[in-house]
Amino acid sequence: MQVKPLGWWIRSHYCDELGVEDVDQQVCLMGWVQYRRDHGGLIFIDLRDRKGLTQVVFTPEFNAQALEEAHGLRAEFVLAVKGVVRERPGDMVNPNLKTGEIEVAVTEFRLLNRAKTPPFIIEDRVDAAESLRLKYRYLDLRRPFMSENIVFRSRAVQAVREFLHENEFIEIETPILTKSTPEGARDFLVPSRLNQGQFYALPQSPQLFKQLLMCSGLDRYYQVVKCFRDEDLRSDRQPEFTQVDIEMSFADEEAVMSMAEKMISELFKKTLDVYMETPFTRISYAQAVAEYGLDRPDIRFDLKLRDVTHIVKGSEFRLFAEADLIKALVVPGGSILSRKDIDDFTDFVKIYGARGLAWIKIKENEWQSPIAKFLSELERSTLSVELDLQVGDIVFFQAGKPDMVNTALGSLRVKLGERFDLIPKDVFAPVWVTDFPLLEWDEEEKRWVARHHPFTSPRDGHFELLETDPGQALARAYDLVLNGNEIGGGSIRIHNSLEQQKMFEALGIIESEAKSKFGFLLQALEYGAPPHGGIAFGLDRLIMLMTKTASIRDVIAFPKTQKAACVMTEAPSGVSPRQLRELGLKLREKPAEG
RNA sequence: GGGGCCGUAGUUAAGCUGGUUAUAACGCCGGCCUGUCACGCCGGAGGCCGCGAGUUCGAGUCUCGUCGGCCCCGCCA
């Protein structure tokens, strides 16, 4: 069987399109051999393209020569098939296939290309090792699961673009080769050949450019844009990722948030037919941390943390007595947990720096607990009343530094939500988190750093706090959280040069550095900068949630591994001595290989 | 920087407290087959047990190191 050119053949249908209404039509399909069922005198091939499968049948009645040749077909061979659509008799209908009521009887076919036996079978139920899938990514993307994710992503981006264009936003590209700035994540650097010893940085986000576009009067900007951060990876984090980046002039936080939630709800309506009620729920940062322990609360289930410091601070239990904060988490019906379960949860909270996990099982006549004996009668009764404890409940306690207590117990809350099946599937629960602190104390650098970024405006009247009590200043910033995942965040920016300089001062950035790193921004703000603000959405993470995939890699065509490498191209790699010389670079140590 | 899990035919896995020739399924190759649909039946090939040391009479199995993949903490405005 010879490989033949495409010639003048033209595809008439995709492999998901034909049905009984097309019977007797002459059609032409093109695709890959999915399954081959060779009966000797009769051969069935399931032909696959990106849309679906169609059974084509080679029979001697239609073309004996073609049947003869088709014995040589193998998985993943590329075919063009011409034939007649036939209705299948009732008992031969395949109800599992969209095109299962028909088949295409082959009158003529062309083998367009052969294929080696693939390293793994191209189908959804085969769970090949991820490293293998990544090495042969082009094959992995043939699987319906993967290609559907990629197609969905395209549809979602399309919906976002439509919304933004309808709302007067202008798509504007910003530089990829740009300037390294202090603050924030580690930069990816690109050496400059024409300016030896100097480096570009890849943008962590187009933050400054979009603000400058507002200064330009372009008024409403957006961009679907790659961003780069040289930090460690996670299942929801890649070193290069895509943001839907938005900025608008003459807007306060209400304007940005209302625009953003319209965009998100329209996106969900258009692509998933999911209705989201607007306006979205809002919660302050302080309340989020108090009740959920995290600044990205999953509000799909209740189970809130309770501050019990005032009740048990004076207890004889040393861990409580020494703690700055003691919080409790009551799980109704949780006393069914075994010792082993509790040990596992204890190990889990230790990840976050907890020393242990205190617990009390509320039984009919007693409190079963390693710590009950340390609690006075009053402490017990106060806990019982304030936490409304019922027989069958379990109470977990976490005590220590506030950050640790909140993170550990907040993470445990999510874990318990899963364990007790409290999290409704198929629910998308967006929530705005607002009133973030403007600054955070960086213990390592011994200075205040911007929690969002240094261009975020403080709330009215909070500028003065920068000099008196920086930790109390609140930001005009907002995060959008979906099912416990941060999917977007933004702020109203400082649009006054003097205020921006004051902010740099508060961050310990000296004037000369501010001038050299951000001089262009400070200048731009002096030439009539409009009030402005914006938001950026993490597209990959958003798509991951919408498609309910477990990893961000499943919604990115060519992702990187945890070591930020591409298994397929083998990037990163060494470069030739000549390339280094041209760039004026010299490696400190000899690499293993060039 | 740190913690954890995993690496055995092409693939997915099994391989017990170390013990003869390392199993199975799918895939692959050959043959048969006109109604299958993850076709079926018969036969066959296929292994540096990730790599390197060590312990041992003996290592897929135990120890250490190393490489790779994944999950997590730190980090990620």
Image (cartoon, coloured by chain):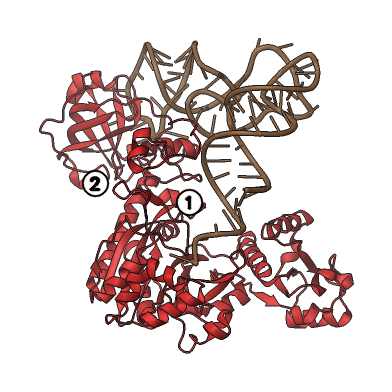
Chain colours: A red, B brown
Q: Quadrant of residue A123?
A: top left
x and y percentages locating residue A566 in the rendered image: 42, 41
Q: Residue furthest bottom?
A: A461
Q: Quadrant of residue A351?
A: bottom right
Q: Residue furthest left?
A: A8
- Mark nearer the viewer, 2 or 1: 1
As displayed, is residue A531 above or below residue B19?
below
Residue A266 visible from this viewpoint: no
Residue A65 or A118: which is nearer the viewer? Answer: A118
x and y percentages locating residue A439 in the rendered image: 53, 75
Dot 1 alpha-carbon crowd within 10 angstroms: few under 14, some 14 to 19, many 20 or more: some
Instruction: Report the chain holding disc 1.
Output: A
Q: How much space separates mark 2 and mark 1, taking CA atoms? A: 31 Å
The residue shown at (64%, 59%) is A419
Q: Which residue is mark 1?
A: A551
Q: Quadrant of the image for the C terminus of chain A?
A: top left
The residue shown at (35%, 40%) is A142
Q: Is residue A292 left or right of residue A221?
A: right
Q: Quadrant of residue A139?
A: top left
Q: Quadrant of the image for the N terminus of chain A?
A: top left
As displayed, is residue A376 above or below residue A266?
below
x and y percentages locating residue A465 in the rendered image: 53, 85
x and y percentages locating residue A575 in the rendered image: 38, 36
Q: Is residue B58 left or right of residue A503?
A: right
Q: Is residue A316 left or right of residue A45?
A: right
Q: Amino acid at mark 1?
A: Ser
Q: Are marks 2 and 1 in contact (CB under 8 Å)?
A: no
Dot 2 alpha-carbon crowd within 10 angstroms: few under 14, some 14 to 19, many 20 or more: some
